[in-house]
Amino acid sequence: MLKWLNQTKKKSIKHNTEGNLEDLIKALKPSKDFNRFEFETKNGSCWVSYLKTMVSPDFIHRDVFPYLTEHSFTNIYDIKNLLPIEQKLITENVTEIQKKIMSGSIMIQFNEHDTKCLLISAVTVETRQVAMPEVEFTVVGPKEAFVESLDTNINLIRKRLLLPQLQLKEIEVGKLSKTRIAILYIDGIANQENINTVIQRISDIEYDHIIDSSYITQMISDNKNSPFPQLLDTERPDRLSAVLTEGKIAIIVDGSPHALYAPITIVEFFSAFEDYFQIWHMSSFFRLLRLFAVTFSVFSTPFYVAILTHHYEMIPMDLLATLISTRADVPFPPVMEVLIMEVVIELLREAGARLPTKVGQTIGIVGGIVIGTASVDAGLTSSILLIIIALAALASFTTPVYQMSNTIRLIRFPFILFAQLWGLTGIAIFFAFMVGHLLNLISLGRPFIEPIFPPRLTDLKDAFFRLPFNRQAKRPIYQRPEDPNRANAKRINEKHDNEK
């Protein structure tokens, strides 16, 4: 089958399709779901072929077969003109015929060996209904999430942005999977250079199958070796609609319930879309809380290792006595103690994620309590470290974007190793290395840690904290939107003054 497909591809490039339709039919015949039969019409017969697992049987028996039975035909064009169906095509291009049949079209030939045939779209799409978000769940706000159907996902976007400037470009990627990928942007707002970059990178992908949007993230990122994601994924159509109005580029992959968008900055990974549904005071507080939690999650255990190994003189005398008593029976050095507990926490996370929901929750809670208590009683770890590990694990869960939470889990381990080698100096060395890496990181050619560097006062209004909407009249500068104005700031301020 693959050999035939390669031969067909080569022949189609040379525009030599004569006789290849019979080879296509021979290749499909061994499949149990391929139907090919002679259908009796009023004044003769025609040949019908299709994949029964890809077409709608109700559509065939309601909108196709009755018309073939009740009317007379002299050629394939008569059949096309009579059928009251919108999507129909007459062609003898074997590449097009193969694509249509595999996508859920019916092939009708007037005679058995005709190279020219009529293709009628009768595709049936099995997909789940639009449901509530599971990863980005919010208490307030819309409760719709993307599904695996590309057309459904685009519908969820278009009903929120009722404007003709919302443009859609579709690209087919994957030598075998032929996956449809939609690129969305708002014409007149999105930067044309960003649009061209996304289209070019997706068009240049050479891989046999694309199953999910995560494939695209890894293939078109600016730095494929970085642990930091340079595209942000979301399952919320309201969030994607909002970032489109900022001038970002959206990528939706058929078969994936998550969409991507770029360019992005690191601060967006700590911003939950629910922040925009609350008053700006609360939103700013929660963002700062998340940043503190992430900082604590990354540095708490490395500081524990560094201070107990190299800088124990920094510990207050009252606390030092408690530490000595809790670690008196622990046979391991601090770094081994920390690594054991960190690995145990990661094992509990993976077990909870891979098991069914109810069982996973039970394993996480019971396993954490039992293992933690048993390890302290057995003298394998100190009770203070157990508290620090638990708080660090809890703090890492505050990250609203799952991709970044995985990165935070990963970078904690090199910090621990550097803390063991050189103490606080080692933590500073690896931190400097990480900052240098972030300074060089870009997303679609745009700085990844903006507005920190380069410093942009305007973009700080919606970064570490969120100011009121009337103070955010400009779109983010770093992505160079063609229309930088989101609202008329002067008019907003005048209205606000008049209300006072």
Image (spheres, rainbow, N blue to C red):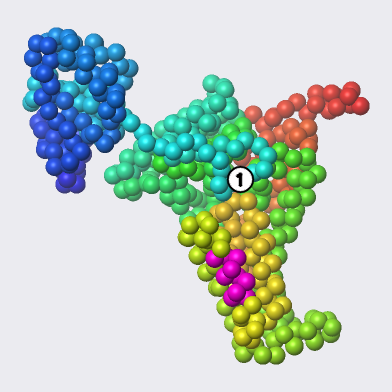
Answer whether residue 419 is visible to the viewer in this image: no
The residue pinned by badge 1 equals 137
Which quarter of the rendering shows the C terminus?
top right
The foreground one among 295 and 459 is 295
Which quarter of the rendering shows the N terminus?
top left
Q: Main secondary structure of the magenta part?
A: helix
The foreground one among 222 and 333 is 333
Answer whether residue 37 is visible to the viewer in this image: yes
Q: Residue 104 appears at what percent x and percent y?
A: 28, 31
Instruction: Tell me which segment is drawn in magenta.
Output: 363-372
Q: Is residue 366 magenta?
A: yes
Q: Residue 172 appears at what percent x and percent y?
A: 36, 37
Point 64% across, 55% down: residue = 399
Point 67% across, 79% down: residue = 305
SS under mark 1: loop
> Tag count in the figure?
1
Along the horizontal axis of the image, is 355 left or right of 40?
right
Q: Is residue 53 magenta?
A: no
The image quadrant that residue 78 belongs to is top left
The image quadrant that residue 310 belongs to is bottom right
Q: Residue 485 appears at what percent x and percent y?
A: 69, 29
Along the horizontal axis of the image, is 208 left or right of 288?
left
Point 70% across, 55% down: residue = 290
Give amino acid for label 1: Phe
Point 52% across, 61% down: residue = 360
Along the horizontal axis of the image, is 480 left or right of 20?
right
Q: Residue 362 appears at what percent x and percent y?
A: 56, 63
The image quadrant that residue 392 belongs to is bottom right
Q: Residues within 10 Å of mark 1 (few under 14, many from 20)?
A: some
Residue at the right extreme, as displayed = 500
